[in-house]
Amino acid sequence: MKKSTIWLLTILMAVTFVGLLYIEIKYMDDIMKMRDDQFSEGVKRSLYMVSSRLEQEETRYYLEDNVSGVESAALYSQYPDGQPPHLGGISYSFNTFSGLEGSLTIRGDVDKISKLQGDQLAALDRTNAMREAQARLDDRVRYQKGILDEVILKISTQAINRPVLERVDSTFTRQIIAEELANNGINVPFRFAVVNRNGIPVYTTDGFPSVSQAKDNTMFIQALFPNDPANKKIFLKVYFPSKEKYILNSVRFLIPAFAFTLVLLVVFVYTIILAFRQKKLNEMKTDFINNMTHEFKTPISTISLAAQMLNDDSVRKSPGMMQHISSIINDETKRLRFQVEKVLQMSMFDRKKATMRLQEVDANITINNIINTFKLKVERYGGRLNAALDAEDAIVNVDEMHFTNVIFNLLDNAVKYRREDVPLDIKVSTADIANSRLEITIKDNGIGIKKEHLRKIFDKFYRVPTGNKHDVKGFGLGLAYVYKMIDLLGGTIKVESEINQGTKFIIILPLIKN
């Protein structure tokens, strides 16, 4: 797959994931804001009803406390003598007439009159009953009006002088706050306090925070008895410690979707990284195969040419030429074997099948032997190889063969990446450092390494670009091998370099006594 195609897919997927995450976050934020507004509106309605119920409770208090006295005063104050009237009977008198004459006539008239009077009396009784009912109704109206007037007067003049703890009972207040919040669908823990107009608490419930501790969106205030004078006003403060958790619970169904999206994003990023790493690895392997082909081709060609020369009779008759050709074949065979072994070693270490033959080695002696052997190669290029093996204790526990290869590889790199315009100068030193450790430093004055390449030089198959310089051979395995060996020996290696100033490798190894 082309690199441009990978980048195109990466950009498209990145835009898609960013858009999806933005939509989810925006939707979650909108829901939380809506729930917060609903919560605030419900609390405000609830606290308004709490204020109204406290006013009603105070009115009921005055009605129950004073109703008997007010009732008596209102009932008896409407009569002049202070006593209600009593209803009496109706009496009728008839004149009798003496004599027999006309007695029957009179008796007949009396019967008619009695009947007539009976009808009149019934009508009069009905009228009186209606008047009495109206009077009683008027009495009740005046009675109720008297009670209300008296209660209103007492509420207006006496209520504001009642102690706050009597006007706003904590138990009753807690009860009605819980009831009103439940009526508005809010079932969360709360704390409350009653404060005066200066914000000084009259009383608070357990857990009510101070002003500095409470957040603005978790504290709600409601004025109680709003008709009280300004200097007598009191306020109800209600605090919801778990409001944020309550709001978050409303969007918790979105959390799994958000988490899955993040997981997909992480997997996508990891996949892209693997794709680029795999592409880079393929490129390095291609370079490795090309370099390996070239490295193998040169000694094979040399050996082949030497073998052809052996077929010449004149060469076979010359002992000096035979010795020269045999040395060439031997040297090129060693070179070829060394390259093959280097590849095999890295392969074995990758599979963790290589074995280390650890033994006590004096690093100063081993390094000095390597320097004496390598000095000729450095002098061939007109350079110098200086040693300052100043470590007093240099006994380390290493595999001598691999330790020798490590030092040899670092020296060989110093020669490969030298500057043509400056004589090669390599310095090797050892020193004792704290915590019973040995420091080995190999410094050169070569072309140096750019900072962006320093962190990659220990990767397999990685070779620092050298521009148009094509005479530097290798597989890109030397420093990877060095890093692997030092790590297996329990040490560390770091590199310092500047362009056209040279490179310094610093190896730290534990001493035997450590």
Image: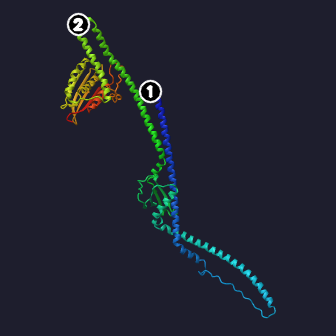
Q: Nearer the viewer, residue 459 or 197?
A: 459
Q: Secondary structure at mark 2?
A: loop
Q: Residue at x 39, y 27 (%)?
A: 280
389 lies above or below 170:
above
- On the picture, is 13 further left or further right than 143? left
Q: Which quadrant of the rendered structure holds the N terminus?
A: top left
| Residue 214 % position (x, y) | 43, 53
51 lies above or below 284:
below
What residue is pinned by disc 1? 3
Q: Nearer the viewer, mark 2 or mark 1?
A: 2
| Residue 99 % position (x, y) | 79, 94
| Residue 266 % position (x, y) | 43, 37
| Residue 256 % position (x, y) | 46, 43
Q: Secondary structure at mark 1?
A: helix
The three-letter code of the residue at mark 1 reads: Lys
Q: Residue at x 62, y 74 (%)?
A: 139
The three-letter code of the residue at mark 2 reads: Ser
Q: Quadrant of residue 153?
A: bottom right
Asked whether the residues under the numbered discs 2 and 1 touch, taking CB atoms below 8 Å apart as contact, a structural biologist would say no
Q: How is the image coloured?
A: rainbow
- On the picture, is 154 further left or further right than 450? right
Tell me which numbered mark, 2 or 1, is placed earlier along the sequence.
1
